Amino acid sequence: MVKNNPNVIITGTPGVGKTSHCELLAENTGLKHLSINQIVKERECHDGYDDELKTWIVDEDKLLDAIEDEVKQGGYIIDWHACDLFPRSWIDLVVVLRTDSTLLYDRLSARGYPQAKLDENMDAEIMQVLLDEARESYDEEIVVELRSDSADDIESNVERIESWLKQWRKDHAEDGEDER
Ligand SMILES: Nc1ncnc2c1ncn2[C@@H]1O[C@H](COP(=O)(O)OP(=O)(O)OP(=O)(O)O)[C@@H](O)[C@H]1O
């Protein structure tokens, strides 16, 4: 299928700023924000709720089936704290957001996370779990690591992604012309 728009994953540890980035990027570009959290709940792509970690237990096969037809058309910003489940052929850019661990601690504490969940997420950020997962799952040219410490970071990161998008659209418009 020829896509007119790319698919971008915005990933990173919970609390790193994925939703904040996705919302601004969607508003500025017209790409659609696909919150996997919401899809899992609304389309029931889970095997129940983990009471201890206060999170849904995701059924990845159900989730991929639920979004495949939409995502294959292109134009989605996928917002999720994992990335290795999405087929490489669907994805054009993977942005891994990173933040300072003190800032992350404050953001997650403010949400009232249980201690076990807070510790797990702090460890994941410090050990750069998501960055390694992205690098192992996709070609290195499409994986970008960006800081998300301040509001200015959000703006400049979104601007960078917008520039990338402009170039992607230009390149693919030329491809389309070549094919004619
Ligand atoms: N770069 C930033 N500068 C200042 N505050 C930020 C930044 N990124 C996120 N925050 C704040 O941290 C909190 C969590 O942000 P957000 O919901 O965007 O994270 P998330 O990665 O989408 O989390 P989750 O994976 O749990 O959905 C929010 O209160 C948000 O305002």
Image (cartoon, rainbow, N blue to C red):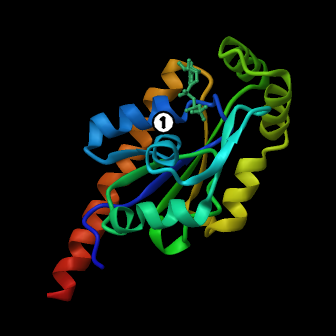
CA neighbours of label 1 inside 10 A, class few (<14), some (14 to 19), many (20+): some
**Residue drawn 51% across and 64% down?**
64
In the image, is residue 124 above or below residue 136?
Answer: above
Which image quadrant for residue 177? bottom left
Which image quadrant for residue 139? bottom right
- x and y, in percent, of residue 71 in the image: 38, 62
In the image, is residue 141 above or below residue 163?
Answer: below
In the image, is residue 180 above or below residue 150?
Answer: below
Along the line of sight, the residue nearer the viewer: 166 or 23: 23
Along the line of sight, the residue nearer the viewer: 141 or 82: 82
Q: Secondary structure at mark 1?
A: helix
User: What's the amino acid at mark 1?
Assistant: Asn
| Relative side of 31 to 62, left or right | left
The quadrant of the rendered image in which ligand 1 is seen is top right
- x and y, in percent, of residue 96 in the image: 61, 46
- Residue most toward the left? 180
Instruction: Please tell me how many numbered marks the rendered image carries.
Output: 1
- Residue most toward the front? 48
Beta carbon of the mark 1 residue lies under 8 A of ligand 1: no
- x and y, in percent, of residue 120 in the image: 83, 35
Residue at numbered disc 1: 157
| Relative side of 111 to 179, left or right | right
In the image, is residue 154 above or below residue 96?
Answer: above
- x and y, in percent, of residue 172 in the image: 28, 70
Image quarter in which the C terminus is found: bottom left
**Residue drawn 53% across and 41% down?**
37
Image quarter in which the N terminus is found: bottom left
- Residue most toward the bottom? 180
**Residue drawn 73% across and 15% down?**
109
